Amino acid sequence: MLRKLDLYIIGLHVLPFLGSILVITTVLLLDKIFDLMDLLIKKGVPFEIVLKLFLYALPFLLALSVPMSVLIASLIVFGNLSQNFEIIACKSCGISLKRLMLGPLIFAIFVFIFMVWFNDRILPESNHKFKNLLIDIYIKRPIAQIKAGVFNEVGNYKLYVRNKDDRTSYIEDVRIYDVSDYGKTFLTAKEGYIQSFQDSILVFNLINGQMHQFLDGFVNKYRVINFKNYEVIIKLDISMQIRERDFRSDREMNIRQLLDEYKRKKEEYKKASDVELKKYLKTRVNQILVEINKKFSLPFAAIVFVMLSAPISSIVRRGGFGTALGISFVIFTIYYIFLIGGEELAKKGMINGAIAMWFPNVFFFLIALYFIRKEEY
């Protein structure tokens, strides 16, 4: 009988779990969709390339949405069971809340195992392909690198454009600093156009502007030259972008690669004698430790969330997606603040990386134990 009850409760989780993944992933995608639409509509990147970027971005979002979906599904199921007095009926038959949690916990353990594999195999490769595809876009469409409203560093220049039309390459309110001559030359223009040649040369055709230039040998003296038309030619370092393809950041490494990097940096730290170098290596070791533990701690949240959702739903006694979404939003917001806050502190060397990544799970695990014990009495 109890085995059938476990299968029944697990079966109740399936549809809310899948539906929650769809809803949460869609919500998380909204921010990415605006950037992708910008590439498609404004920058003229082909649809198939944008679609590839979209697919490569999905695994990162799924790594967040799956544990949260377990939480929502459990809140919905246990909320409905409580609202329909099924939990009370089970208790009257001698079946405790902890026993009712067994099926969902087994389900959460399978989710944990799958997500650890997913974070180790699928996620690093998708992150790496996403980065490489962006490099391809920037090599073939170097104009796409320049963003309006912020300072951009291109070649030996720092430049700012207030407005930019990606279709016509028209720019307004242009400011260009030549970094190669220690900022002695500064250009401003009301408008202009950008052209690219051979995928490695950018030409700024500036209209109605001024050149401010410090004079060699003079202190605090410079000349101003007004111009109607002026060209600034910037040669891009394509070789650097090509080298970037082979480099993998921590989020692009699997567990084995991270462990190898961790051992290398630990050895370098032991051999280092310079104080600043040792400080850097210690911070670097902690950064790697963060990524290793995050591949396990985030999936493990699915187990903790099941333990937390069952007693909370029993206390609240309300089911439905709206109630579950509201409660899960509060829980996951707190969880995410702890996770991101701990990650930042760990990457600055202020706290151990393993402690930072597991603290949110321990925090909610203790809260879950408190609610379970409270529900029993």
Image: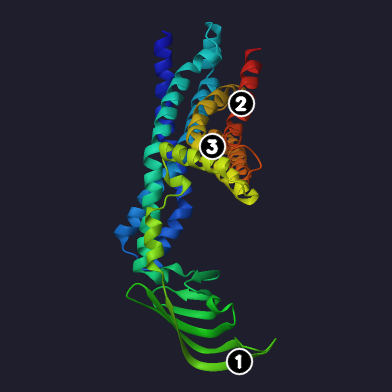
Q: Amino acid at mark 1?
A: Val
Tell me the residue that label 2 is attached to: 316
- Measured Cα–Cα span from mark 1 to mark 2: 72 Å
**SS for tag 1?**
strand
Of callouts 1 and 2, the N-terminal one: 1
Of callouts 1 and 3, the N-terminal one: 1
- Dot 2 surroundings within 10 Å: few (below 14), some, or many (20 or more)? some
Q: Position of residue 285 (x, y in %)?
A: 55, 42
Q: Residue at x 42, y 40 (%)?
A: 257
Judged from this view, the residue extending furthest toward the top is: 94
Tell me the residue that label 1 is attached to: 224
Q: Nearer the viewer, residue 143 or 25?
A: 143
- Dot 3 surroundings within 10 Å: few (below 14), some, or many (20 or more)? many
Question: In the displayed structure, would residue 41 be above or below residue 89?
Answer: below
Q: Nearer the viewer, residue 65 or 266?
A: 266
Q: Residue at x 57, y 83 (%)?
A: 185
- Dot 1 surroundings within 10 Å: few (below 14), some, or many (20 or more)? few
Q: Quadrant of residue 61?
A: top left
- Measured Cα–Cα span from mark 1 to mark 3: 61 Å
Is residue 328 at least partly visible in the picture? yes
Q: Amino acid at mark 3?
A: Leu
Instruction: Point out the frontmost of discs 1 and 3.
Output: 1
**SS for tag 2?**
helix
Q: Which mark is residue 347?
A: none
**SS for tag 3?**
helix
Tell me the residue that label 3 is attached to: 325
Q: Amino acid at mark 2?
A: Val
